Amino acid sequence: MTNSMVSKLLEVMDRTLIGPPISRKEWDYKLVPRTTMRVLKDHGLERTFDPNNPINTDLSLADEFWEAGFSLAVELGMFCPETERIVKFTEEEIEEALKNAVSEVSLGKGKDRITIKVRVPEDPSPPIAAMSALGLSVSEELYVPICQSIAQYRIVDMLLGACLDRLHGREVRSRTPYETLAGFYEAKLVKEALHRAGRPGMPVFGVEGAPTEYGFFGGFLPGGFEPECTLAICLIPEPFTLPHRILHRVAVALITGTSIEAGHMTTIGGYFGPPEGAALGAIAAHILQAASMQPTVIESTILDGRYFGNCGREALWATSVANQAKSRNSRSMVLGITSQVAGPGTDMILYETACISLAEAVSGAAIVIGTRPTACKYPNYCSGLENKFCAEILKASAGMKLSDANYVVKELLPKYERRLRDPPKGRSFKELTNLVTLKPVPDWLAIYEKVWKELEELGISKP
Amino acid sequence: MGKEELLNRLKDLVVNGDEEGIREATKEALEAGIDPLEIINEGLKKGLDIVGEKYEKLELFLPDLVLAADTAYAALNIIIPRLSERAQEFRKGKVVIGTIYGDIHDIGKNIVASLLRANGYEVFDLGSDVEPRKFVEEAERVEADFIAISCLLSPSMFYMRDIIQRLVDMGIRDKYYVIVGGAAVYPEWAKEIGADGWAKDAEGAVKLCNLLKERGKEVEKPVLVGKWR
């Protein structure tokens, strides 16, 4: 950790203690939504969501969103919930942070080492495919097989472990030594899965199953996640907040020399309102996290609050315009998330995956994480195959035009969008996987092949 | 201003989330002799219904929903003391609410708290990341009817069970209806830990409390409101 890194973190911490005071209610329900709506109006961005074009193809619109997001970031700043104070950044500080943003990083070891690079819309090189059973609760006995089933596919570049539900049979209770031990245990299990998949040097994320800083600290102790192979997850559950409990993670990541994945989530229908507001919020949050958290990559997830996924028309559009804005106007690396509501073993999860993966990738995401079946509702409802599919779509998107991706998405959306609020549950890992070979069962493979055939007919080449 | 106009104004003030304005308008409506029940049903409730419909259609958003509910609550605070013997009907009960230990998500919990308030419940909000013992201590202190627990993270769900176990250990389990909800919480979990009810969303939480309040002794537990996919 350099002196400059320490100084930056100390400066941010100091501001959380001395910034202008504001109550949580005033911030959440008045200042943030009202300022967002005003900035949207000032920049003429209200009602720009186009349901007939779920992937934005107007890059000048994306640039206007960037300008508006920058204004919003400067005007609002971030809220520290522990001290109920606003942490402000000047225009110059933000510009400096964006200018110095990391635009390339290499992670992993040996033949599994990869390089994440900043991308732009329609970039000829594909994004990094980071696959997972994202956020899903997974049984202890299935943890390694599930991770292995994902990592076994060579097209997958990075692995994000799932959330462990037990630790040697015990409940993993947050903020207890169980959680601290589970953070470390997750690292062990992920490494074991990579070893079994024959990909020991594959880069990973840590710690996925860390609801509090205890699990995070446990994961980064010696013998746990290795700095040269890991992106340290420092996600902020609420937009525009800068909690001390997340800055703990930033401190540990800096001390251990681990690259930081900052992140935030904005919800359509939530604090930022309509799809345009959610896109604007995501851009401003990206800018503010670049200024406050010393990130290597910045995750941005725009969910639709009506079904808590990001594969509907509104979320796809907001994701595309926000990613285009960020990737065209800064050199910071954008990390996208795919969040499906259908379960594995269904065609719907593959249609959802295709749409959101295309939206993320053609709009300039440097790295994309998939998949998140059933929006994490059902433990063990995941498999390797939807992850392989997601990675294939990401790789197939290299060089694709926004208009072509928009065409494909428009063809696929009618196949599932009416089911977003009542999606099929699908089947569990055990039902979808041969537990000896870790290959998909034949009927799941047949669904995958059927959907790929449809995509090929729409002009996408399977890599 | 005529009766119809006053009721419409109340409705609009709820939709606009204008807490200041509604205090004045509520007093004016009461002084004009409008039946408090009519103020609630034809003014406040209609406003809340409009907000609910618009929220569903993405015409209004989370902050609008919370501010509208808080506005209706501000009006209820003025109306309820005027209801005299009928007041009991609107003082539906006391709810101690919070997000469980280890979990800092509180958006959903805040919506539930606001809608409960707007529907006549007295709500004691403990915030997020709340230790199990605090739920019980607060429920005892305020003589609550309900303990409402929210959770979005699986590793924090176990603490919900601790609250119920604490109530059992103290011999006061039957004093409270314990209801649970939040993205991580599924109906089977409510059953497993011995909760009295589970609701899918904030509107469901209001229905759940109403149902338990009215027929809690008769119905089989846990009462489940809404569909878990």
Image (cartoon, rainbow, N blue to C red):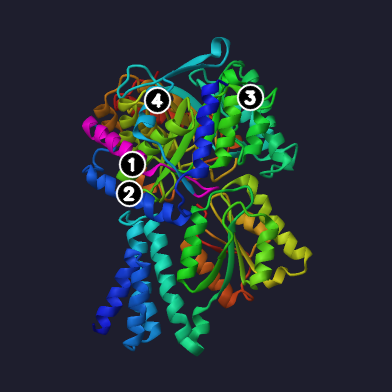
Q: Which residue is mark 3?
A: A225
In the image, what residue type sits under mark 1?
Answer: Leu
Rounded to the nearest angstrom, the CA distance separating label 4 from label 1 is 18 Å
**What is the chain letter for disc 2?**
A
Q: Between disc 2 and disc 4, whose residue precedes?
A: 2
Q: Position of residue A90 (x, y in %)?
A: 37, 35
Q: Between disc 4 and disc 1, whose residue precedes?
A: 1
Which residue occupies 65% across, 27% down? A220
- The residue segment tinted magenta is A58-84
Rounded to the nearest angstrom, the CA distance separating label 4 from label 3 is 24 Å
Query: On screen, A418 above or below B52?
Result: above
Query: On screen, A184 above or below A43?
Result: above
Rounded to the nearest angstrom, the CA distance separating label 1 from label 2 is 7 Å
Share a chain, discs 4 and 3? yes
Using the image, tell me which numbered label, if any, was put on residue A35. 2
Q: Is residue B146 left or right of residue A358?
A: right
Q: How many marks?
A: 4
Share a chain, discs 4 and 1? yes
Q: Which residue is mark 1?
A: A72
Q: Nearer the viewer, residue B195 or A102?
A: A102
Q: Which residue is mark 4?
A: A332
Quarter holding the N terminus of chain A is top right
Which residue occupies 48% across, 19% down? A155
Magenta residues: mostly which secondary structure? helix
Rounded to the nearest angstrom, the CA distance separating label 3 from label 2 is 40 Å
- Circle 4 or circle 3, nearest the eye: 4
